[in-house]
Each structure stands twice: as C-alpha cells, then as structure tokens.
Amino acid sequence: MFDIGWTELMVVGIVALIVVGPKDLPKMFRTLGQFTAKARAMAREFQRAMDDAADASGVKDVARDLRNATDTKGMGLDELNKMRKWDPLKDKTRAPDPKTTPSDEDKAATARISAEMEKLRKERAAQNDGTGTAASADTSPPEQDAAVETDKSKA
C-alpha cells in the first residue's frame, strides 16, 4: 500500500526513539496501534453501510438482470462464439474479394515485369562475363539493378 521497506521502518523507529525517548516509546506505539484499529473499524463500518445501501436500492438485482441480458446462451447467440473462432482466410467456401484479388491485367503486368527483370539479369551477366569480371562480383540485388536501369533510361 505505502511501499515502505524495512530500512525506512528502521529509520522511523530510530528517529522515534530519539525524539520520544525510550521511556515513552511503548505508550506511543500502543496509542498508534489503537488509532490504527479505530481507523480500520471505521472503514469496515463504512463498507458495510455502503453494501447495505446498495442492497436496499436494488443494485444487486440490476446487476443480475444485466448479466442475464448479456448472456449469449440466453439470447441464442452461441453461434457468435463459434464465429469468433472462424478464420476467413482459411475458409475455402467464401467468394474471393474483388478488391484484394489481382485482376488479369495485374497478373499480365507482373508477368511482363518479371520477364523484363530476367532479361536485364541475363544482359548484366553477359556484360560481366565479357569484361572479365565474375558475375558473382555484383552484390546489389536484381530489384535495385532494374530500378537503376529504369532511372538511367529516363535520364
């Protein structure tokens, strides 16, 4: 609750011993204990009074009614629990979404780009073999090579 460690308690005890004195220290601790017991008793009594007021006003009845109203079995919504476990990506019976499914034009464009990339790779390999350098000396990925080639053609 207060996050007080043993070292802090020892410091408080030493300061209390010096300030109050060894003769009056037991009386002070007894008084402090009685005060703490009274505070706890008051808190317990307050909690009981709050619980009694809640019972008298019908809060428990309202809480029970709300629990019953949100019960999925009582409303026949057991299927919702089954649907939460359903993964639409694994379901093979659903129709493909036209927004996320690539069109024939997209597939053709992808095939053209792949063919062009392969052609550029072969040309680069032929150039490297013709100059005496090894084809493996080129460490840049082919995707960057194509981007460089297209940037050079634009310039």
Image (cartoon, rainbow, N blue to C red):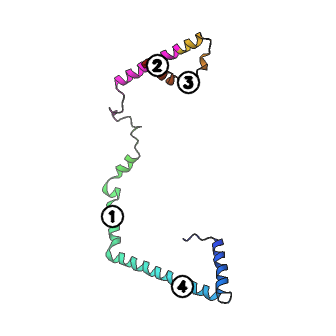
Disc 2 marks which residue? 152
* Residue 126 x, y percent position in the rendering: 55, 11
N-term-proximal mark, 1 vs 2: 1
N-term-proximal mark, 4 vs 3: 4
Say if the magenta span includes residue 65: no
Query: Real-space Cα distance between discs 2 and 4?
Result: 87 Å
N-term-proximal mark, 1 vs 3: 1
For the residues bearing labels 4 and 1, Cβ distance under 8 angstroms: no
Q: In this view, does 77 lie above or below 87?
A: below
N-term-proximal mark, 4 vs 1: 4
Q: Which mark is residue 140?
A: 3
Q: Residue 66 carries which label?
A: 1
* Residue 61 x, y percent position in the rendering: 33, 70
Q: Is mark 2 on a helix, strand or loop?
A: helix
Q: Is mark 4 on a helix, strand or loop?
A: helix
The answer to whether 10 appears left or right of 83 in the picture is right
Query: Real-space Cα distance between discs 4 and 1?
Result: 42 Å
The local crowd at label 1, few if under 14, some if 14 to 19, many if 20 or more residues have their Cα within 10 Å, is: few
Identify the image quadrant of residue 60.
bottom left
Amino acid carrying mark 4 in the image: Phe
- Image: magenta residue range: 94-123
- Name the residue at 65% across, 80% down: 15
The secondary structure that most of the magenta stretch takes on is: helix
